Amino acid sequence: MNENEKRVLMVIFGGSGDLAHRKLYPALFELYLKGQLAEHFAVIGTARRPWTHDYFRETVAANLNVGTTVQQQAFVQHFYYQSHDVQDADHYIILKKLIDSLDQEYDLGGNRIFYMAMRPALFGTIAAHLKSEHLLSSAGYNRLIIEKPFGHDYQSALALNEAVISTFARDQVYRIDHYLGKEMIQNIPYLRFDNPVLAAVWNRDYIDNIQITLAERLGVEERGGYYETAGALRDMVQNHIMQIIAMLAMPKPNDFNDAAITAARREVFTHLHQYSAAEVPQKFIRGQYGPSTDGQALGYRQEDKIAPKSNVETFVAGEIRLDLPQWQGVPFYVRTGKRLPLKKTRIDIVFKAAAKNLFGAEKLAEPVLTIEVEPEMRLSWHLNTKEIGQSTAAIPRELVFTLPEREAAQVPDAYERLILDAINGRRSNFVSWQDMAGAWQFVDGIRQVWEQCQCPKFPNYASGTMGPLAAEELLQKTGRTWIFKD
Ligand code: NAD
């Protein structure tokens, strides 16, 4: 066995689903091609459909776009399918037999990862049966990976958590937020803490505001049923945006280990400034897309599985504050929405402008450090420089670093990184319960105020635009503006 090779049995609940086929199996294949998984691993996909092992293997192979056919075929031989209704206790007895036999056949040392790639309402049932039917191993490790959405408010997330930790110890639970696996998000602590020059100015004395944009070009597509129960605040702000803020604002961890990183991130989630009911409308605005101006794209209310008078938001913009001394007075402006003109995840760190130009009197631009997360991976700095020639004016110039194509091609997909972390027992890129709870409490405070009022009138932005006017006004009233414009 090569020294990188891992021994693990992965049981995927929801193994016939979209997430498993589009994300999990290709990620496992990358790990296989890189030698992280070789001979000593097996995957059991479970779902209700009565598939055979061979048919399952064909569906897995059909989603692999790299490697040779020989490699793909060798890989899928490690896959097994078990038809399984998660509500039926007898099915766990059959599943246990398959798990035990594969553990022996592949010499897996009892290492087990259970992956919940299905609707959260079923997590508690699965966890309870794993315990009562003795599917946990006593030899190796047992770990549980859970997907979002983790609850729809604090109370439901708490209930879900209690159900899960009645079977798994807290340190066996890995809550995925795949944004934490993205290369440029991983890059943030390196930028902040490995460059003393940046570390020195990463605080309220030098930063005026931070802007985070998660723009999606698509609408709800076929996820209408789910989206009607969620909306942009729950779907994007509670998790991905909050995790990005934690990476940007956490204090320097005392050490490069899981406990220290988790403790640093927790500082952020325990210091989210809660707004009063009167403050919420000033600090958070919402929107819903209507048809595009050329009539080519439908409005949200015309989409499949959407109520014709739905009041669900597809756009949110807001200002988040942290009650931490180093961030006093620094607004974190966030916005996310569907059917915006393009797909883009980007962070703009807006530094304070100098009071005046060295030689002239004109107002200077703020220096801005931009981290583009996707689709391009790019860093750029807008700095004030001398205008060429006899002029004494200062003008902003952009210094750009784009990941070279060859390196960009080697960047692991977020799921590949996070699954390997889970196999290695590295927990720092997963969401702790305390962080989850803090984020839900913050978001619930906004949601509860919104629920009191059917306002504003939806739809309030056209498909293909950067969201409602109120998102611009949110910054304009403080004399600021969004750095990223379409
Ligand atoms: P999906 O509908 O494609 O798959 C759901 C799976 O659960 C199927 O395999 C289905 O057979 C199985 N299932 C449902 N009820 C079952 C039961 N009673 N017993 C056994 N199996 C049952 O859904 P998906 O898109 O794969 O998403 C799964 C979960 O992951 C959802 O909670 C979703 O919100 C979340 N998620 C999905 C994505 C994605 O990209 N698809 C991304 C992030 C999170």
Image (tube, rainbow, N blue to C red):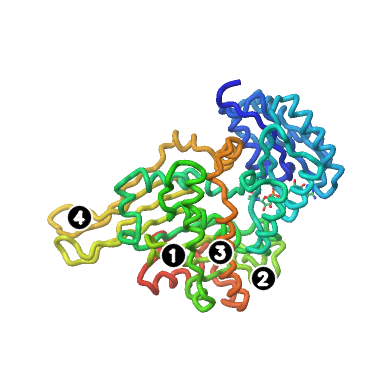
Q: Is residue 48 left or right of residue 403?
A: right
Mark 3 or mark 1, whichever is nearer to me: 1
- Tell me the crowding category of disc 3: few under 14, some 14 to 19, or many 20 or more residues within 10 angstroms, Cα based: many
- Tell me the crowding category of disc 2: few under 14, some 14 to 19, or many 20 or more residues within 10 angstroms, Cα based: some
Among the two numbered marks 1 and 2 on one chain, the one whose residue lies closer to the N terminus = 2
Q: Is residue 338 left or right of residue 187?
A: right
| Residue 271 drawn at (x, y percent) | 48, 62
**Residue at the far left in the pictured view:** 390
Q: Is residue 338 visible?
A: no
Pointer 1: what residue?
Answer: 323
Query: Residue 463: which disc?
Result: 3
- Give SS at disc 2: loop
Pointer 4: what residue?
Answer: 387
Mark 3 or mark 2, whichever is nearer to me: 2
Label 4 lies in ligand 1 vicinity (Cβ under 8 Å): no
| Residue 410 drawn at (x, y percent) | 49, 34
Which residue is found at the position 65% from the left and 26% from the top?
Answer: 69
In the rendered structure, which amino acid carries the disc numbered 4?
Glu
- Give SS at disc 4: loop
Residue 11 against residue 321 in the figure, above or below: above
Pointer 2: what residue?
Answer: 310
Mark 4 or mark 1, whichever is nearer to me: 1
